[in-house]
Amino acid sequence: MKLNKIISPLALALSAALAATGCSHKYAGNVTNIPHRPGVTEGNNAGRPNPSPTLPVEPPPAPPFSLPNSVPTSTPNAVPNPPGTTPTSDINLENYTLDRVALAAYTVHFKFDSAVVQEAEQANLAAVAQALGNPNLKLLIEGHCDERGTEEYNRSLGERRALALREALDKAKIDPMRIKTISYGKDQPADPGHDEAAWAKNRRGVFILLHPKTPVP
């Protein structure tokens, strides 16, 4: 009985000493300070990491640059040639007297849908070139077509015929700047008929001699 009374106080004292020094067998040497972790905040999310911030969304790439449909494709100040004319030189017809008789016999004719000067027409071209031996004279060439085809197409074809004759005279040593060309398409037929005979007459190039109104010094 006396021994128990002595041991009990000693056991209590020893336990108290061990607790005071933190040397309990369960936690001895294992207690560490936990550092503060970034992203952990107080409040409603205490102890939980903050959600990752929302990254900005990269905008979609811009579409390739292209001109709007409204951009004009021609020079705004350009003045088109008046209907029925296709000038190729700066000859002002108001300064000349138009002689339609002098070269009327040398009209050149073309095959259907063609602007090729045929070999049989070379004699007519030679006569026109000879008439232009006077350097004061100039020449107007009219291109004509038969009635078949659209107005726009025949206007273009008449122009090509007149220019083909101008080029042929250029090869005959006639300065092209002395020659003006005009296309009338199918607007001025030589024969109003509607058969092959009339059409053959209307596919033509007409030469008009130009005399200056003011005498050249």
Image (cartoon, helix red, strand yellow):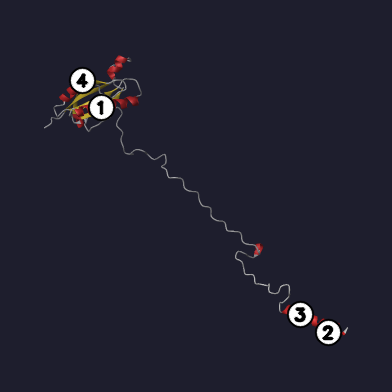
Q: Is residue 146 above or below residue 34?
A: above
As drawn, the label of residue 106 is: 4
Q: Which residue sits at x=34%, y=26%?
A: 153
Residue 66 location, x and y as percent? Answer: 42, 43
Location of residue 93 by image quarter: top left
Mark toward the viewer: 2 or 3: 2
Task: Please state, as top left, top right, bottom left or bottom right, where the N terminus lies in the image.
Answer: bottom right
Instruction: Report the amino acid beneath label 4.
Output: Tyr
Per the image, the residue denoted by label 3 is 16
Which mark is first along the chain, 1 or 3?
3
Q: Dot 4, crowdedness within 10 Å: few (<14), some or many (≥20)?
A: some
> Disc 1 marks which amino acid?
Ala
User: Front-most of 207 and 196?
Assistant: 196
Disc 2 and disc 3 in contact, CB within 8 angstroms? no
Residue under pointer 1? 164
At mark 1, the secondary structure is helix
38 in relation to 183, above or below? below
**Mark 3, other Cα within 10 Å: few <14 / some 14–19 / many ≥20:** few
Q: Secondary structure at mark 2?
A: helix
Q: Earlier in the sequence, mark 1 or mark 4?
A: 4
Q: Secondary structure at mark 3?
A: helix
Q: Residue at label 2?
A: 6
Q: Nearer the viewer, mark 3 or mark 1?
A: 3
Q: Amino acid at mark 3?
A: Ala
Say which residue appears at 72% left-offset and 79% top-offset.
20
Q: Quadrant of residue 157?
A: top left
Q: Decide which of 138, 17 is in the foreground and name it.
A: 17
First in sequence, mark 2 or 3: give its number: 2
